[in-house]
Image (spheres, rainbow, N blue to C red):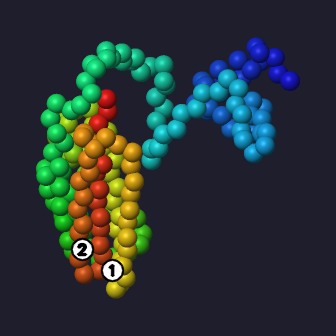
Amino acid sequence: MMSALAKEKLFLAMKKRGSRCSPNNREFQQKEGHWHVKHSVSTVSHSDEPSQCDESSRPTVRMENTYQLGPTKPFPVATVNHILEDVLTTYLQEVQYDPEFCRQMTKTISEVIKTKVKELVIPRYKLIVTVYIGQRDDQSILIGSRCLWNPKSDTVSSYTFKNSTLFALANVYAVYFE
């Protein structure tokens, strides 16, 4: 069993090196199929290129409560629908279906859509962008989604694109952040 000082030194060394936790670490104990972690901090993020930015170098931003429970202006669904139509048409108009190309294209298109919607500077909305691309081969598909949200302030924009060999569906979910 490790002493409290040894555990603290191990945690600080892991934190300095950028590592958070691993299942080989002795601070993990598996009991009845559940992992228990003592004195652990975990951060999950996704990036194609890992950054070497140290967490302590970031400035701490402190915000006051606004007690604003709803948006000051509604989310511009029509404008976002035009963005979805423009992006999907621009990127996929002359494209033939290829699984690998479409896999990369879904990532690219979703990032472009997210960037263009963020350029509208709509305050206090969290954006979730999903793009589906599939082959048109005389089949049908049903795509469903579920969210827990406030129908007074949260909304979704959607556009479907089709050409001779593929279909694409892009959704932008806008969830108001109170």
**Where does the C terminus fall, quadrant-wise?**
top left
Residue 34 spot, x, y in % from top left: 72, 41
| Dot 1 alpha-carbon crowd within 10 angstroms: few under 14, some 14 to 19, many 20 or more | some
Would you place residue 32 above or below residue 163 in this image? above
Mark pair 1, 2: CA separation: 8 Å
In the displayed structure, would residue 169 be above or below residue 69?
A: below
Quadrant containing the N terminus in the rendered view: top right
Residue 74 place in picture, x, y as percent: 16, 39
Q: Secondary structure at mark 1?
A: loop
The quarter of the picture where residue 12 lies is top right
Where residue 72 appears, as percent x and y from the top left, is: 16, 30
Q: Is residue 132 visible?
A: yes
Crowding around mark 2 (Cα neighbors within 10 Å: few <14, some 14 to 19, many 20+) is: some
Q: Are marks 1 and 2 in contact (CB under 8 Å)?
A: yes
- Residue occupying image coordinates x 48% and y 32%: 52
Q: Which residue is the extreme one toward the bottom?
A: 138
Residue at image location 37% in from the left, 74% down from the top: 141
Instruction: Give, as a three-letter code, the residue at label 1.
Output: Arg
- Is residue 25 placed above or below 129 in the rendered structure? above
Q: Secondary structure at mark 2?
A: strand
> Residue 136: which disc?
1
Counting every numbered tag in the picture gives 2
Amino acid carrying mark 2 in the image? Lys
Q: Is residue 107 visible?
A: no
Q: Which residue is mark 2?
A: 162
Q: Which mark is residue 16?
A: none
Circle nearer the N terminus (1, 2): 1
